[in-house]
Structures are given as structure tokens and as C-alpha cells.
Image: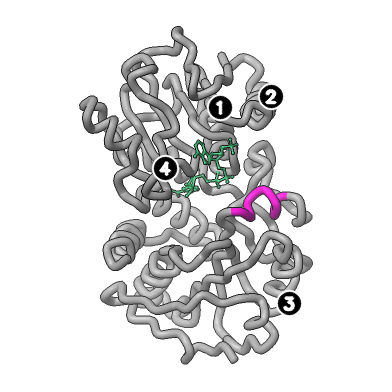
Amino acid sequence: MIDATSVTIENRNSKIENPPLSLPDLASWSFSGTALAVLGQPIKHSISPAMHNAALADMAAREPRFLDWRYFRFEIPPDALADALRQLHAAGFHGINLTVPHKTLAFNCIDSIDTAARPAGAVNTLRRTPDGWEGFNTDGYGLAAAVRETLQCELSGMDIILLGAGGAARGAAVECAQRGCRSLAIANRTASRRDELCSAVGALAPDLPLRSFDPAEPPRDLPRGALVINATSAGLKPDDPAPIDLTRLGRAAAVYDMIYNPPQTPLLRQAAALDIPHANGLSMLVHQGARALEIWTGTSVPVDVMRAAATAALNAH
Ligand code: NDP
């Protein structure tokens, strides 16, 4: 049985124990507060519960209505996602975050999608409606806020080289196009996925100079001074290669890697060696999470508390 007492939460010092749950746990769900959750596979390393529960504790100190809000995590395989979403709705959950591999799958199994999220074809945040879930994508917002905060870059007016064509890259590409980047070049090892993303962005922004290429063979005429964004998962594992060799691009203005664990990837190590400003994905995680919490709570949220809790949870890992 899952109830409030089965979850140890010491938010004041960011020490949070929030065991990963699975679908069978919902059969005996008895938590009576307002429940939020992240679904993914694997999920055990997610630091989202630490970040959100710290924010909720801070908000509850000022607004008692948040005293019974808690954020859980569920290990859900892709073939169980639709069933999980039905069961979470029946159990009264108020909001859901989706991580790998659910963002594009969920897009196809919910009825209502925020107009800004539609072009991305991927959702990472769901808000309860009377009949089901409404989907949002806060990854693009998180990316824009993160590059502003860590690299002092605006997506608007920038030449962007985007690495990857998966769920995160889709959100990033749409955000770059909607914010009016100067040009967008998409690199992905699987040609069909990069071409498909290129077509989708082209339909959304017909006047945007847009191209796609194989990261093993970068074209020679890519713009110098671009912002390079890594939205591939190359770098997550210790022996992963860098998703591109930065010396084969015109000198970049800055490099942003969405990966935050490990904090230093081969791509970021090369950026450091070349003296190019760079940052990892922790800031994006914080800002996409903050935007999701705003959507669920309808109020402003303590971004600094979320950043501190995420940093502490990562260090504890
Ligand atoms: P997907 O599985 O949807 O996409 C994975 C992408 O990585 C594809 O483009 C894939 O290319 C590429 N890729 C995987 N392995 C390699 C490799 N060895 N070499 C080159 N390319 C590779 O994942 P997501 O888009 O959801 O996530 C991508 C990354 O972004 C993850 O590391 C995730 O942790 C991070 N992320 C971070 C966020 C943050 O808040 N900081 C938010 C969202 C994501 P191909 O098509 O050829 O298979």
C-alpha cells in the first residue's frame, strides 16, 4: 500500500528518499494528497522527485494548500504507457512528467495537446482534465532559459547546429524555429530521422534557412559562431563517443549539452579544450521542471530551490 507515510521526505536539506514505483503499486494506491509523478524507463536515477518535492516544501511554507502535494516516480515500460496513464488518472493524479522513452509515445495516446506543443510531436508534461490528460512540452522553454542563463545566448537571431533528432531534439528544433533563429542545421546519424525532423520544421517555418547532415561528414560551409546544442544521448555512458568533432565545424560561439549526468561529456571536454564557452543540461532540467510545476500549480515556483535540490541530488549520486 502506498500512503504518505511510506515516503520519507526531508525537503529542508534536500535529502529525499522516494522509491521508484511500478504499475502494480497503483492497484493499492491510497495517497490522499495531490500526487504528481514522472514516468520513464529507466527511472531510478531521475532527480526530478528531489527537485519538485523541494520546491513543493518551499511553496508549502508560504501557501498551505501545497502541504499535501508530493511528486513520485514510476518505472513504466513503453508498452504499458497507455494503461499507466489511464490508471494514474483513475487514481486521481494531478500531473505527470514523461521522460525517455515516453515523450513521442504519449503524444499519440492523449486527446488534448497544447497548441504550442503540437509542432514538436512530443510532450513531457501532462495536466489532468476531467476526462484525461492535456499535454505540454516544456523542454523547448527549458532550453531557451538555460542557454540564456548559462551561456548568455538567445536562440533568436542565432545560427544553431542541433545534434540529434529524437524527442528532445524535436522540442529544441521547434523552439529555435519559433523564436526566430537565423539558421538551423540538424545533424543525426540516422538519415531518415534527421530528414523527417527537417521537413517538420520546414513546414512550420518555411523561410528559415534549414539543412540536415550526417555528423560524420559535416558540410564545409556551416556558419562560424554557431550555438551547438547536443540533443543526442551520446555521452550518457562512460565509453560513448562525442556526437560530433567540434574541430570539423566552423568555430562555435558556444556549446550546450542537454546531458547533465555525467556533468562532463566528451563533447564538453572538447569544447573546454578548444576554449569554447559550454554548459551541461542541468539548467535545462531545472527550467523545464519549473515550467511544468507552474503549469500544475498555476503559480510562480522557486527556481533557485529547484536548482539547489537538483545539484544536491546529483552530487549524492
Ligand atoms: P531519444 O531516444 O528520443 O533520441 C536519442 C537521440 O540520440 C537520437 O537522435 C539518436 O540518434 C541519438 N543517439 C543515441 N545514441 C547515439 C550515439 N551513440 N551517437 C550518436 N547519436 C546517438 O532521446 P531524447 O531525445 O528524449 O533524449 C536525448 C538526450 O537529451 C538524452 O541524453 C536526455 O537525457 C537528454 N535530455 C535532457 C533534458 C534536460 O532537461 N537536460 C531534457 C530532455 C532530454 P539516432 O536517431 O541515429 O538513433
Residue 248, image x and y in percent? Answer: 38, 17
- Examine the rendered structure and indicate whether residue 152 appears above or below residue 281: above
Q: Give me the disc on residue 90.
A: 3
Q: Mark 2 highlights which residue?
A: 199
Q: Is residue 204 visible?
A: no
Mark 1 vs 4: CB contact within 8 A: no
Question: How far apart are the two marked residues, 2 and 1, measured between alpha carbons?
Answer: 12 Å
Q: Predominant secondary structure in magenta?
A: helix
Range shown magenta: 101-107
What is the residue that sits farthest to the front in this orientation? 239
Of circles 2 and 4, the one toward us is 4
Pointer 3 residue Cβ closer than 8 Å to ligand 1 = no
Looking at the picture, which amino acid does disc 3 mark?
Ala
In the figure, residue 127 lies in which quadrant? bottom right
Label whose residue precedes the other's in the sequence (2 or 3): 3
**Which quarter of the image is occupied by the C terminus?**
bottom left
Looking at the picture, which amino acid does disc 4 mark?
Asp
Return the residue nearer the eye: 27 or 303. 27
Question: How far apart are the two marked residues, 1 and 4, measured between alpha carbons?
Answer: 29 Å
Q: Secondary structure at mark 2?
A: helix
Question: How far apart are the two marked residues, 3 and 4, measured between alpha carbons?
Answer: 41 Å
Q: Residues within 10 Å of mark 4 (few under 14, many from 20)?
A: few
Label whose residue precedes the other's in the sequence (3 or 4): 3
Q: Give me the disc on residue 240.
A: 4
